[in-house]
Image (cartoon, grey):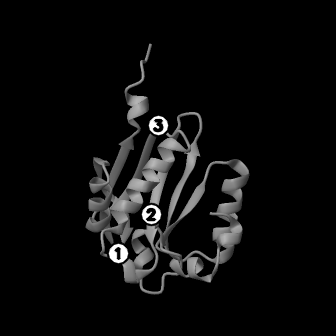
């Protein structure tokens, strides 16, 4: 995704009108057009953050974000967002994670992907596990949400090409 792809539909995905972003970032805040443009432009400039659109035919319904990429260790975060709420709950999250993982491994040469989810965001955790990721750990009381602590579930996926490489 390039800055020119950032139309009003995509920007709306990152507005927290119905509270869906409470699971997207630790803060749960909305992201402005300027925030998104800055992230996309800096990612392009540094070649360490890449956004991809999730499409239904010609209609954007969400995004996959790969990055920031740690080029020394060849690791990266991978975050999916089904921003068009009409598509939520249809199992598209797992497919988006699977395709994002494939792009990260094949196009960007990532060795290891990771992400984190609120423990109560069971749908997201299931989507990552269904896409071949594994749960690394549960970080107790990592978040503080609505005046109470909440656990974080850390998930990861290893690129089999790197895992099978001869270390010697």
Q: Which residue is mark 1?
A: 147
Mark 1 and mark 2 lie on one chain; the one further toward the N terminus is 2
Locate the N terminus and report the quarter of the image it occupies.
Answer: bottom right
Spatial separation of the CA atoms under disc 2 and disc 3: 19 Å
Mark 3 and mark 1 lie on one chain; the one further toward the N terminus is 3
Mark 2 and mark 3 lie on one chain; the one further toward the N terminus is 2
Between 56 and 9, the one nearer to me in the picture: 56
Which class describes the residues within 10 Å of circle 2: few (<14), some (14-19), or many (20+)? many
Between 77 and 163, the one nearer to me in the picture: 163
Q: Is residue 4 visible?
A: yes
Q: Point out the frontmost of discs 1 and 2.
A: 2
Question: With respect to residue 136, does 81 lie above or below?
Answer: below
Q: Which residue is mark 3?
A: 111
Q: Quadrant of residue 168?
A: top left
Q: Which mark is residue 80?
A: 2
Between 113 and 147, the one nearer to me in the picture: 113
- The answer to whether marks 2 and 3 mark residues whose Cβ atoms lie closer than 8 Å is no
């Amino acid at each position: 995704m390039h800055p020119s792809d950032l139309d009003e539909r995509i920007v709306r995905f990152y507005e927290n009108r119905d509270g869906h972003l409470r699971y997207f970032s630790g803060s749960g805040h909305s992201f402005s057009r300027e925030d998104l443009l800055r992230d996309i432009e800096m990612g392009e400039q540094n070649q360490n953050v890449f956004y991809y659109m999730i499409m239904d035919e010609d209609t954007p319904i969400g995004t996959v974000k790969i990055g920031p990429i740690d080029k020394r260790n060849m690791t990266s975060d991978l975050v999916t967002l089904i921003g068009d709420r009409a598509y939520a709950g249809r199992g598209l999250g797992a497919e988006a994670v699977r395709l994002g993982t494939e792009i990260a491994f094949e196009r960007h040469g990532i060795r290891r992907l990771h992400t984190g989810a609120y423990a109560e965001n069971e749908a997201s955790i299931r989507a990552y596990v269904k896409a071949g990721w594994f749960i690394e750990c549960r970080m107790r009381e990592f978040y503080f949400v609505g005046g109470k602590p909440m656990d974080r579930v850390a998930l990861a996926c290893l690129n089999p090409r790197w895992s099978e490489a001869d270390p010697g």
